[in-house]
């Protein structure tokens, strides 16, 4: 896909603005902030580094494991579903921070404009489900989901919300 320089500049400007906003809040501790190409090698290194940082900063194993599994799923989804530029770069933003004792993350990537309405609708639907409906949706997609051309069946976002 031909990504315009203006679009990329805006994408990275927003990343920097978000980072500055987080850093200016005394109640927020930014653990990781990265904006750039999420190639395979860097994704592996970032995942490995995140695992070590979680071990250092989070004592309880259950939230640490849940967060790490969501982190991996998000990184995989970015790598699988992002639009790439002419140089095969996957432009992304990954920010992990602690706020009020909670571990939080924000993941951003560039998608085709034509997919935004469908993605937003699917995200809204899944985010508004109660746990029982979400589990039923997971099982339905698991058993009957149609695999996309990129290999996914739509389980990624469901899995992240469940965790």
Image (cartoon, grey):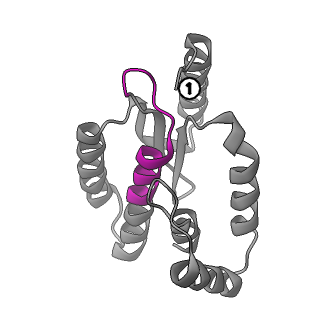
Residue 148: x and y in percent read 52, 59
Q: Looking at the image, is 28 positioned above or below residue 149?
A: above
Please give the residue where the numbered disc 1 appears in the rendered image: 20
Q: Looking at the image, is 74 positioned above or below residue 147?
A: above
SS under mark 1: helix
Residue 128: x and y in percent read 76, 69
Q: Looking at the image, is 102 positioned above or below residue 142?
A: above
Q: Is residue 33 left or right of residue 114?
A: left
Foreground residue, 114 or 56? 114
Residue 140: x and y in percent read 61, 83
- Residue 92 is inside the magenta segment: no
What secondary structure predominates along the stretch shown in magenta?
A: helix
Tell me the magenta residue range. 71-88
Residue furthest top as drawn: 5
Foreground residue, 56 or 82? 82
Foreground residue, 97 or 149? 149
- Residue 77 is inside the magenta segment: yes
Foreground residue, 53 or 73? 73
Residue 54: x and y in percent read 32, 57
């Amino acid at each position: 896909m031909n990504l315009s320089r203006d679009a990329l500049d805006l994408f990275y400007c927003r990343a920097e603005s978000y980072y500055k906003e987080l850093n200016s809040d005394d109640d927020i501790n930014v653990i990781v902030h990265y904006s750039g190409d999420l190639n395979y090698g860097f994704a592996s290194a970032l995942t490995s580094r995140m695992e070590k940082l979680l071990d250092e900063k989070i004592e309880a194993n259950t939230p640490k494991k849940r967060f790490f599994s969501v982190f991996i799923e998000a990184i995989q989804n970015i790598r699988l579903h992002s639009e790439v530029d002419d140089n095969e770069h996957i432009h992304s933003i990954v920010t992990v921070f602690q706020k009020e004792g909670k571990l939080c993350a924000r993941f951003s990537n560039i998608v085709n404009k034509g997919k935004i309405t469908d993605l937003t609708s699917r995200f809204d639907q899944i985010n508004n489900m109660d746990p029982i409906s979400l589990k039923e949706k997971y099982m339905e997609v698991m058993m009957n989901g149609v695999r996309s051309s990129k290999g996914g069946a739509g389980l990624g976002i469901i899995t992240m919300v469940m965790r």
